[in-house]
């Protein structure tokens, strides 16, 4: 008789509710976590949340209405009165952290950390003012470039027309300021990264392509969107769908669907988006901005990592808040009250523990990824192929844990560029950088075919099929060797 081990009925993998909650908190985006913290603070009297005032775009500590580093404008949090406490057992209907609505904004004073105390009693200082598009853009752009390039930033922002397009050419600004063409082009590329997307474009085609590139980081765009914008925008503007379909050899219905996608997702005039947001309360209250979760900084020792949430929140769990138990009958209500507070404090500790595990996991993953992609962070190119499975194996974590830790998370690079964390795991991005460099280095008399590009990449240790090269080249919007002639 052959004996074989048989699984016992009780040896079954069970997923507890606590594990599900912990995984759900790990998967939350920064905005979702903020709402979860606020909700838990409202519902749980034993949880005390101290929120430190930091810039949600660069992580710098803030003491006034604007960030001293990047110039981002944020409404100040109202400090609660020292000797006040909420009524006993009355439901709290207002958020515990209220926002001051009347804050004076001075674009010329954005670099100072503290505001002038004399304005507290100035009635004119309490009048809410709306910053113009130029006042909003200039501090952000100057924070992304060196002080020597500040005059270039002023020229670029100052020459935007009412639609948000740049009226002067790079050559004109370069000649006027007597600076190299490349410096002006670099500052303009940084302007293109700011909100509203497409600002600083030279024409509607470039504006829509900038927006489409940013949108492709969040979702997969319509496969014909780039082609229509890049080569058939005039026909698209006149709704000549049949002619476009004939030239592209695709069904007319596909062209109509791509046109609907472009009209729904993109906007050709970025300045009008800003104007509508400022003057329409419905848009201004629902507009959200992508905020970094991980900030990567360069210092004398190398690269360092900061977690925005870790700098922003401090948690403390109390066993029995005194203001809620005041006036209770100790003999009759003490056991029930003690049981209630014990349950709430256990719930608060578990909630805080889940958030701290989230921070620990995100930091471990970020440190490994940043160390692996150090060349990309130093030079801005050549992302090394990396998968979430490799990260999970090196950190001895489950691949699902790594996936949840990096989902809906963003990293602020030392260059000031904000990218999704998923970009670190897109191996094709590094290959596309090399492919673009090879194409840019080719001579006008001889353009590399896809077969030649495949051989050059293979010589660099990146063996790829010719059809893969063709796919990457088309995704980057680069024509074939005949079209580049």
Image (cartoon, helix red, strand yellow):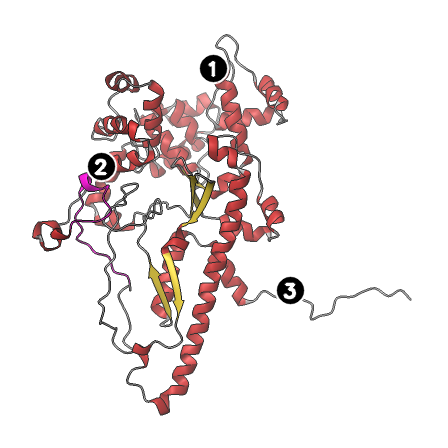
Residue furthest toward the front?
300
Q: Where does residue 323 sit, x and y in percent of width and height?
A: 29, 77
Q: Nearer the viewer, residue 263 or 7?
A: 7
Residue furthest toward the bottom?
331
Q: Nearer the viewer, residue 245 or 263?
A: 263
Identify whether 91 is placed above or below 451: below
Element carrying mark 2: helix
Compared across the picture, whether 71 is left or right of 433 comes to: left
Note whether residue 339 is visible.
Answer: yes
- N-terminal of the pair, mark 2 or mark 3, is 3
Identify whether 83 is placed above or below 21: below
* Residue that mark 1 sits on: 484
Mark 2 and mark 3 in contact? Answer it, CB < 8 Å: no
Identify whether 86 is placed above or below 126: below
Q: Where does residue 386 sit, x and y in percent of width and height?
A: 57, 39
* Residue that mark 3 sits on: 13
Q: Where does residue 425 sit, x and y in percent of width and height?
A: 54, 40
Label 2 CA crowd tier, 10 Å (few <14, some 14–19, many 20+):
some
Q: Quadrant of the N terminus?
A: bottom right
> In which quarter of the view is residue 313 placed?
bottom left
Segment tinted magenta in the rendering: 97-116
- N-terminal of the pair, mark 1 or mark 3, is 3
The numbered mark at residue 133 is 2
Q: In percent of the image, x 22 and y 37: which residue is there? A: 133
Note whether residue 239 is visible.
Answer: no
Element carrying mark 3: loop
Label 1 CA crowd tier, 10 Å (few <14, some 14–19, many 20+):
few
Mark 1 and mark 2 in contact? Answer it, CB < 8 Å: no
């Amino acid at each position: 008789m052959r004996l074989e081990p048989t699984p016992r009925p009780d040896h079954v993998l069970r997923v507890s509710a606590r594990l599900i909650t912990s995984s759900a908190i790990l998967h939350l985006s920064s905005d979702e976590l903020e709402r979860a913290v606020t909700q838990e603070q409202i519902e749980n009297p034993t949880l005390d949340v101290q929120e430190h005032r930091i810039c949600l775009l660069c992580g710098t500590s803030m003491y006034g209405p604007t960030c001293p580093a990047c110039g981002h404008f944020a409404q100040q949090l109202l400090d609660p009165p020292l000797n006040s406490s909420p009524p006993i057992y009355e439901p709290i209907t207002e958020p515990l952290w209220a926002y001051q609505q009347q804050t004076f904004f001075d674009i010329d004073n954005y670099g100072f950390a503290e505001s002038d105390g004399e304005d507290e009693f100035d009635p004119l200082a309490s009048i809410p003012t709306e910053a113009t598009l130029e006042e909003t853009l200039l501090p952000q752009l100057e924070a992304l470039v060196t002080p020597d390039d500040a005059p270039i930033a002023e020229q670029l922002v100052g020459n935007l027309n009412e639609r948000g397009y740049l009226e002067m050419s790079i050559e004109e600004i370069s000649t006027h300021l007597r600076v190299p063409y490349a410096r002006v082009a670099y500052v303009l590329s940084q302007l293109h990264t700011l909100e509203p997307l497409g600002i600083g474009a030279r024409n509607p085609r470039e504006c829509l392509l900038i927006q489409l590139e940013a949108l492709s980081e969040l979702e997969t765009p319509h496969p014909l969107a780039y082609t229509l914008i890049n080569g058939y925008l005039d026909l698209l503007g006149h709704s000549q769908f049949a002619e476009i379909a004939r030239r592209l050899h695709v069904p007319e219905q596909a062209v109509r669907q791509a046109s609907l996608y472009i009209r729904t997702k993109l906007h050709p005039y970025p300045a009008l988006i800003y104007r509508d947001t400022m003057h329409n309360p419905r848009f201004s209250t629902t507009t959200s901005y992508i905020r970094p979760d991980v900030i990567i900084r360069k210092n004398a020792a190398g690269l360092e990592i900061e977690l925005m949430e870790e700098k922003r929140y401090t948690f403390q769990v109390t066993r029995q808040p005194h203001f809620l138990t005041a006036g209770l009958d100790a003999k009759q209500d003490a056991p029930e009250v003690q049981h209630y507070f014990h349950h709430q404090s256990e719930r608060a500790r578990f909630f805080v523990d889940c958030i701290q595990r989230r921070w620990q996991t995100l930091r471990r993953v970020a440190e490994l990824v940043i160390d692996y992609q150090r060349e990309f962070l130093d030079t801005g190119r050549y992302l090394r192929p990396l998968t979430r499975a490799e990260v999970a194996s090196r950190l001895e974590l489950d691949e699902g844990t790594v996936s949840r830790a990096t989902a809906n998370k963003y990293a602020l690079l030392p260059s000031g560029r904000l990218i999704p964390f998923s970009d670190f795991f897109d191996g094709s991005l590094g290959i596309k950088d090399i492919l673009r460099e090879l194409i840019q280095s080719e001579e006008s008399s001889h353009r590399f075919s896809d077969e030649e590009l495949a051989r050059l990449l293979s010589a660099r240790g990146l063996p790829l099929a010719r059809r893969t090269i063709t796919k990457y080249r088309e995704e980057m919007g680069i024509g074939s060797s005949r079209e580049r002639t």
